[in-house]
Image (cartoon, helix red, strand yellow):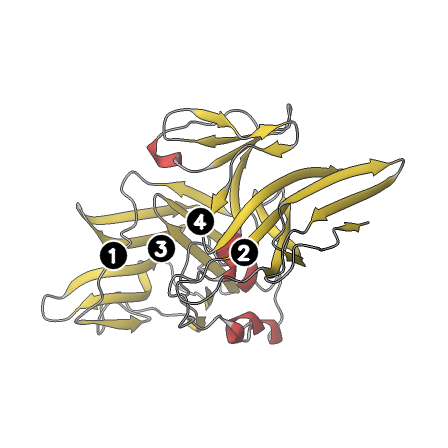
Amino acid sequence: MHHVLAVFQRNEYLFAVVKEGANQLLLGLRFSKEKVHLIYQGSMGRERLSFKRIHLADNRWHSMVLAVSGHHATLTLDCGVPLELVHKQPFPSDLSTDGSRFHIGSRRKWKGLFSGLLRQLVLLPGSDATSRVCPSSKPSLAELSVPTFLSNLPVKSQMNDVLLPPYETEVRVTLGSKPACTAAELGQLWFDTLKRGLFLCDGAYWHSMLQGRKLKIILNGTFGATDWEMFQIGNRVFLAVANGHMLCERGPSLYTINSTIYELDMTTKMFLKFQDIVTYSAVDWEFFSVGDEHFLVVANSYDGSSYSLNSVIYR
């Protein structure tokens, strides 16, 4: 995330990571009159992702968030509608910065010198933290300070060294007509808004994940997800995830944990966290309506010591 005030309209670097000695550019963010370029050292040599029609050099403050993961890169300017690029060569997950230096506002020394003002530069792990760090479409000076979220980042647990940042639970979804399903879209979800179907791309074909309103798969990871329930209230689409237990590398697993309800953001095309609910080895969510009233029920199964538990209905 960057807060920038750009004045001139030539190629300038907001920041760069340069391997010392060889003077090799490993990673750099550069902008010109109407473009923003992400340059990085990939497995096939130097790669460049270019976002067009991005106007930074207008003597105004801007918030810019760039998220990169695999074949996908998303740029959000002033918390507006994100622009997404799909690149043939994925961003390297093992990019080494050993023996390198970070240069803020240049590529190295006077090369590519930035002539505007750079108020804040934040680098975060994970695929996309845009929804957590973007202040607003017209941020005030106070909102341009370090977001509260950044002071509460999770500390890696000694019990489990694979914990992901909380924004990694967001699910990217493509809406509308049937999109392409190739290696670049592997693992992506597509929500058919006409037939209300959810599909998963395996790199060649779209596979239906819904049977009625129920997902036909079980996901396992840091949290053991035992059930997903998609439901709609008016024009709002929700996805409830029942977490059975937290997997711990050492010691006993945890069964009293949060299950999460996500809401589909039609602008960003992502499921964003709506609410956490404490559950006890939840095994099922069910949604139903009685007249104009809507209800969501969770089936609890085990709290670590007893199987005699109450299930709960939420209104």
Residue 74 got which mark? 4
Cα distance, mark 1 to mark 3?
28 Å
Q: Which residue is mark 3?
A: 32
The answer to which of 257 and 127 lies nearer the viewer is: 257
Above or below: residue 287 compared with residue 246: above
* Residue pictured at 34% horizontal, 43% vertical: 71
Give the mark, 2 or 3, whose residue is nearer the N terminus. 3
Q: Mark 4 or mark 1: name the one nearer the start of the chain.
A: 4
For the residues labelled 2 and 3, the Cα–Cα distance comes to 49 Å
The residue carrying pointer 4 sits among few (fewer than 14), some (14 to 19) or many (20 or more) residues within 10 Å by Cα, namely some
Q: Residue at x 70, y 48 (%)?
A: 298
Sequence-earlier tag: 1 or 2: 1
Q: Is residue 180 above or below residue 83?
A: above
Whether label 1 touches label 2, CB < 8 Å: no
Image coords of residue 48 (percent x, y):
28, 48
Kind of residue sitting beneath label 4: Thr
Q: Nearer the viewer, mark 2 or mark 4?
A: 2
> Label 2 belongs to which residue?
245
Q: SS class of the residue under badge 3?
A: loop
Q: Amino acid at mark 2?
A: His
Marked residue nearer the N-terminal end (3 or 4): 3
**Residue lying furthest left:** 21
Q: Is residue 152 left or right of residue 300?
A: left
Q: Are marks 2 and 3 in contact (CB under 8 Å)?
A: no
Mark pair 2, 4: CA separation:
32 Å
Amino acid under disc 3: Ser
Q: Few, some or many C-alpha atoms within 10 Å of disc 1 (few <14, some 14-19, many ≥20)?
A: few
The label nearer to you, 3 versus 4, is 4
Q: Earlier in the sequence, mark 1 or mark 3?
A: 3
| Crowd class of label 3 (few under 14; some 14 to 19; many from 20; radius 10 Å) | some
Residue beneath disc 1: 94
Q: Is residue 197 above or below residue 308?
A: above
